Image (tube, rainbow, N blue to C red):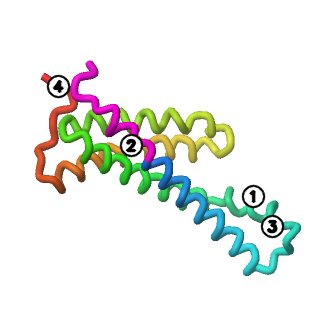
Amino acid sequence: MLKGISFKAIFIGILIAMSSTLASSFILVLGSYFYAGWQGVPAQEEGSHFRTLIHTFPMMLLGIALGGLSTLFGGFITGWMAKQYEMKNTAVMGMLLTLTGIPFFAHYPIWYDVLGSLLTIFPAIFGGYLATLLFHRNPSPSVPA
């Protein structure tokens, strides 16, 4: 059952996906504060303005898109490092990454949580698939023989 699983590749892929998500979120938050300043929002109201802005539909979609790209990158690194059973390793990475997001589900609408979960597993697997294509390896079957 664990044959073909590269725990090192999965761990590094998760680490890369989470750190790039945090970095892109930081840039998003920083941009929101600058946006508030450009709009002439008084300094004492910037916090409430930010909380309102970050929960708007476009900002949530941007957050999901950045998270999906980060996961794709993490899946690519996992697939590249695994060298065999790339799809299996990236699927495990995507599932574990989804599990790490469960504690944050109560903070956003349900559609955001469902879409965010779907855009964790599939981009991870697609990133692993891209790694196999780029390095000219045949994608290994997901279940070892």
Q: Is residue 127 magenta?
A: no
Dot 1 or dot 2: first in sequence order is 2
Tag 3: Cα neighbours inside 10 Å, few (<14), some, or many (≥20)? some
Dot 2 or dot 4: first in sequence order is 2
Pick the residue in front: 88 or 84: 84
Report x, y in % for residue 45: 85, 67
Report x, y in % for residue 94: 40, 39
Q: Between marks 4 and 3, how big is the CA–CA gap?
A: 54 Å
Circles 1 and 3 in contact, beta carbons < 8 Å: no
The residue that disc 2 covers is 12
Q: Between marks 1 and 2, how big is the CA–CA gap?
A: 32 Å
Tag 4: Cα neighbours inside 10 Å, few (<14), some, or many (≥20)? few
Spot the residue most to the right: 44
Q: Could you tell me what secondary structure mostly forms the magenta stretch? A: helix
Dot 2 or dot 3: first in sequence order is 2
The residue that disc 1 covers is 51
Q: Left or right: 68 with respect to 52?
A: left
The residue that disc 4 covers is 144
Identity of the amino acid at label 4?
Pro
Element type at mark 1:
helix
